[in-house]
Image (cartoon, helix red, strand yellow):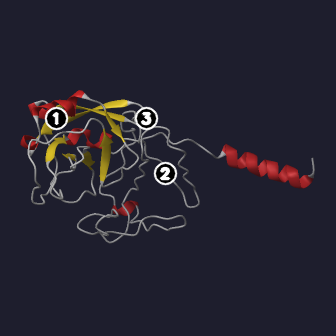
């Protein structure tokens, strides 16, 4: 082995020795020059990284997120971007060292149960449609994003014709366009656009909705009264 190759091998061994895995849901300290790598997602849809003290960007309507539909907030992240941070001094509380308990995210092909309440426009649908809403497993399609999860299944039949004036809606609302295929609203959703909302997912299940990958299936179940919490309206 040549001297140059031996030096390269020692460097590679040193890099490998300094690597460590991060426990999901647990805090980890990073020093200047450290690198955090996020591998391929095998279940769920999104990997979430939070920074103590927060991100030092100007908020829009109280949020630092990018709303692609309304063109609000900072530009979407791209390779090479530098994100300014407030630093730990801006954090009001100490970091809890114990990992947060995390449920296993759904994988393509897996069926998940989401609790819903009916309304406010469930009277726009036939009894058969309301039965079909909870009787089938809806397919999550690739045409989904932060605006909404587009579902595919037996279409929901309306009991009346026409459209509604545009209305505000909560995150988790289930809007049904004329083709009868529901759209489950996510944080970047707009007003209803004249289509009736047949129901809404309870607030406690919305984190699971955000991790639904294409190919997963949803089984809607009616929620108990004590679980009804529909979050904030748009």
Considering only vertical position in the picture, is 175 above or below 166? above
Report the front residue among 1 and 79.
79
Answer few, some or many: residues within 10 Å of disc 2's Cα (few below 14, many 20 plus, some between 14 and 19): few
Secondary element at image label 2: loop
Q: Residue at x 45, y 37 (%)?
A: 43
Residue linked to disc 3: 107
Q: Point out residue 207 in the picture as x, y percentages from the top left corner.
A: 30, 43
Q: Residue at x 45, y 66 (%)?
A: 83
* Residue 221 shows in this picture: no
- Please name which of the two marks, 2 or 1, marks the residue nearer to the observer: 1
Q: Point out residue 125 in the picture as x, y percentages from the top left corner.
A: 11, 40
Disc number for residue 29:
2
> Gap between marks 1 and 3, in whole Å?
28 Å
Q: Mark 3 or mark 1, which is nearer the start of the sequence?
A: 3
Answer few, some or many: residues within 10 Å of disc 1's Cα (few below 14, many 20 plus, some between 14 and 19): many
Q: Quadrant of the C terminus?
A: bottom left
Q: Residue at x 42, y 65 (%)?
A: 76
Report the front residue among 105 and 111.
111
Disc number for residue 154:
none
Q: Point out residue 216 in the picture as x, y percentages from the top left corner.
A: 38, 36
> Gap between marks 2 and 1, in whole Å?
52 Å
């Amino acid at each position: 082995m040549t001297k140059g190759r031996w030096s390269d091998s020692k460097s590679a061994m040193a890099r490998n020795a300094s690597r460590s895995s991060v426990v999901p849901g647990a805090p980890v300290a990073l020093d200047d020059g450290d690198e955090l790598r996020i591998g391929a997602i095998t279940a769920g849809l999104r990997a979430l990284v939070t920074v103590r003290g927060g991100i030092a960007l100007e908020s829009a309507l109280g949020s630092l997120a990018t709303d692609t539909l309304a063109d609000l907030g900072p530009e979407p992240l791209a390779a090479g971007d530098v994100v300014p941070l407030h630093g730990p001094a801006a954090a009001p509380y100490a970091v809890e060292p114990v990992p947060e308990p995390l449920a296993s995210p759904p994988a393509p092909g897996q069926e998940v149960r989401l609790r819903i309440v009916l309304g406010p426009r469930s009277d726009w649908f036939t009894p058969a449609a309301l039965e079909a809403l909870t009787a089938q497993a809806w397919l999550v399609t690739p045409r989904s994003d932060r605006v909404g999860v587009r579902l595919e299944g037996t279409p929901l039949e309306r009991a009346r014709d026409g459209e509604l004036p545009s209305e505000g809606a909560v995150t988790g609302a289930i809007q049904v366009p004329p083709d009868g295929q529901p759209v489950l609203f996510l944080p970047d959703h707009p007003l209803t656009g004249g289509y009736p909302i047949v129901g809404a997912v309870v607030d406690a299940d919305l984190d699971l909705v955000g991790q639904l990958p294409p190919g997963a299936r949803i089984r809607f179940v009616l929620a108990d009264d004590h679980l009804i919490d529909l979050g904030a309206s748009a």
